[in-house]
């Protein structure tokens, strides 16, 4: 059977999945794995269709110093031991800039263009592009497709995507892009099957994971998103602050003498749930902690989800449904219940039993806005595009 390899490369790990394509073009997940600890304690782990481990090995640090080396090791394992020769490779690329509103077949010119957007996503884009470049160099005939986290939001009206700064900066690319687009696109595509009654309506989707954002869907299209120029805006996240007055950044520079590099590290890695609680970036740990600062971080998260839902409801001029997805949204019944309390002013109420059971529909019969839980699958979306 033909197969498609999906690659999601970060700074210290390369995640991959393999999908088989049957005669009717349907995708079947075969394998899920990752090379992590790149440059520190490299490890290859992979599991098969039923979650059974098919690889678990460690490598010396010199063998896997960077992302291209990790891609080479994982690729050799897939080729020589799993005996897989993909017909194409799909990549997650965080930034498609202002122009790409759909996935693109990659060649050298496309790579050069995507490299220009590295300044807009310095922590992600270079790592996303590294495996593309190494495959392009070693297997030039293998088709590769770049799938962007920004593309799904490119339909937004201008008024949603500008900042109130001189317009020439907007034209240079300083604007709101929005992220988690592959997740929202998957949800928009899945709703007609799992919840057709809301698929064409006004829906707020809350992607609540280590990275968190919300998207306003109207008729299955994104009209507004809580993330902006970078993935720092909007909701508080595991280690990112979410919405922050830029005056705070000016203060950190002028009063604390922080450099651009220190600020970048601070904003991406030291804030959010981790910074606020002083305990952890992991929602599970915070929920099981007795420390009042953990409880406060959780309350802050829930409060901000409620606030930003109000903003998106205004963008949609009303709301017909609310959907939870991603790690926290799919798995934490207590957080869902607390978010629903923040939406009580809209007439929302939860069915406690359905919520505890992680049912598709978790709102009670009296709820004026139905609430759903829909698991996301960004890798499948990438495979489908590819
Ligand atoms: P993601 O980035 O989508 O993989 O989501 C990761 C986040 O989901 C982490 O903060 C986890 O703590 C959180 N998470 C996963 N399972 C649960 C759960 N059962 N309860 C609360 N949070 C969870």
Image (spheres, rainbow, N blue to C red):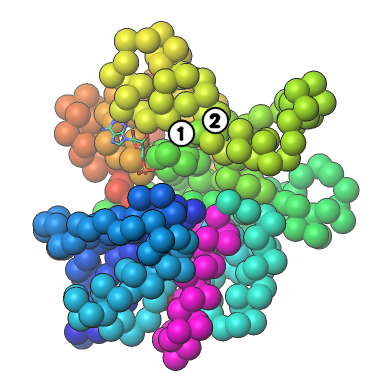
Q: Residue at x 30, y 65 (%)?
A: 17
In the rendered structure, the answer to whether residue 314 lies left or right of residue 4 reads right
In the rendered structure, the answer to whether residue 128 lies left or right of residue 35 reads right
Q: Nearest the camera: 265 or 103? A: 265
Looking at the rendered image, the quarter that the N terminus falls into is: bottom left
Q: Is residue 227 visible?
A: yes
**Residue 112 against residue 357 in the figure, above or below:** below
**Residue 121 against residue 96 in the figure, above or below:** above
Which numbered dot is residue 270? 2
Q: Position of residue 154 (x, y in %)?
A: 61, 61
Q: Which corner quadrant of the image does residue 286 belong to?
A: top left
Q: Residue at x 53, y 75 (%)?
A: 133
Q: Position of residue 171 (x, y in %)?
A: 81, 60
Q: Which corner quadrant of the image does residue 62 belong to?
A: bottom left
Mark 1 residue CB less than 8 A from any atom of ligand 1 = yes
Q: Residue at x 42, y 39 (%)?
A: 210
Q: Residue at x 22, y 58 (%)?
A: 57
- SS type, badge 1: loop
- SS type, badge 2: loop
Numbered range of the magenta stretch: 124-152
In the rendered structure, the answer to whether residue 295 lies left or right of residue 100 reads left
Q: Position of residue 300 (x, y in %)?
A: 49, 20
Q: Is residue 377 visible?
A: no
In the rendered structure, the answer to whether residue 139 lies left or right of residue 51 reads right
**Residue 29 against residue 340 in the figure, above or below:** below
**Which quadrant of the frame does ligand 1 lie within?**
top left
Q: What residue occupies the far bottom of the structure in this picture?
A: 141
Return the residue at label 1.
238
């Amino acid at each position: 059977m033909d197969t498609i390899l999906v690659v999601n490369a970060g700074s210290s790990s390369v995640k991959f999945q393999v999908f088989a394509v049957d005669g009717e073009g349907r995708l079947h997940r075969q394998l899920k794995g990752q090379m992590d600890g790149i440059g520190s304690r490299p490890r290859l782990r992979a599991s098969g269709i039923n979650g059974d481990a098919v690889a678990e090995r460690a490598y010396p640090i010199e063998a896997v110093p960077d992302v291209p080396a990790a891609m080479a090791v994982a690729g050799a394992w897939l080729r020589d031991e799993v005996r897989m020769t993909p017909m194409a490779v799909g990549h997650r690329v965080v930034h498609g800039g202002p122009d790409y509103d759909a996935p693109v077949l990659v060649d050298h010119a496309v790579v050069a263009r995507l490299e220009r957007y590295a300044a807009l996503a310095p922590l992600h884009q270079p790592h996303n592009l590294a495996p593309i470049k190494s495959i392009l160099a070693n297997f030039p005939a293998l088709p590769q497709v770049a799938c962007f986290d920004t593309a799904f939001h490119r339909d937004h009206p201008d008024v949603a995507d500008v900042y109130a700064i001189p317009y020439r900066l907007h034209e240079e690319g300083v604007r709101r892009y929005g992220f988690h687009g592959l997740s929202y696109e998957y949800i928009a595509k899945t709703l007609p099957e799992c919840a057709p009654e809301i698929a064409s309506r006004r829906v707020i989707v809350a992607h609540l994971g280590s990275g968190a954002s919300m998207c306003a869907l109207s008729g299955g299209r994104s009209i507004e998103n809580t993330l902006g120029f970078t993935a720092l805006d909007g909701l508080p996240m595991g280690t990112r602050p979410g919405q922050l007055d830029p005056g705070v950044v000016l203060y950190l520079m002028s009063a604390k003498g922080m450099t651009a590099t220190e600020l970048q590290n601070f904003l991406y890695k030291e804030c959010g749930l981790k910074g606020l609680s002083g305990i952890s970036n992991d929602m599970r740990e915070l929920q099981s902690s007795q420390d009042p600062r953990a409880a406060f971080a959780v309350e802050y998260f829930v409060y901000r989800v409620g606030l930003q839902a109000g903003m998106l409801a205004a963008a949609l001029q009303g709301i017909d449904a609310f959907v939870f997805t991603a790690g926290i949204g799919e798995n934490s019944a207590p957080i869902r219940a607390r978010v629903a309390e923040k939406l009580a002013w809209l007439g929302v109420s939860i069915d406690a039993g359905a919520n505890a059971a992680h049912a598709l529909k978790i709102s009670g019969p009296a709820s004026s806005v139905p609430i759903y839980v829909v698991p996301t699958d960004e890798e499948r979306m990438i495979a489908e595009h590819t």
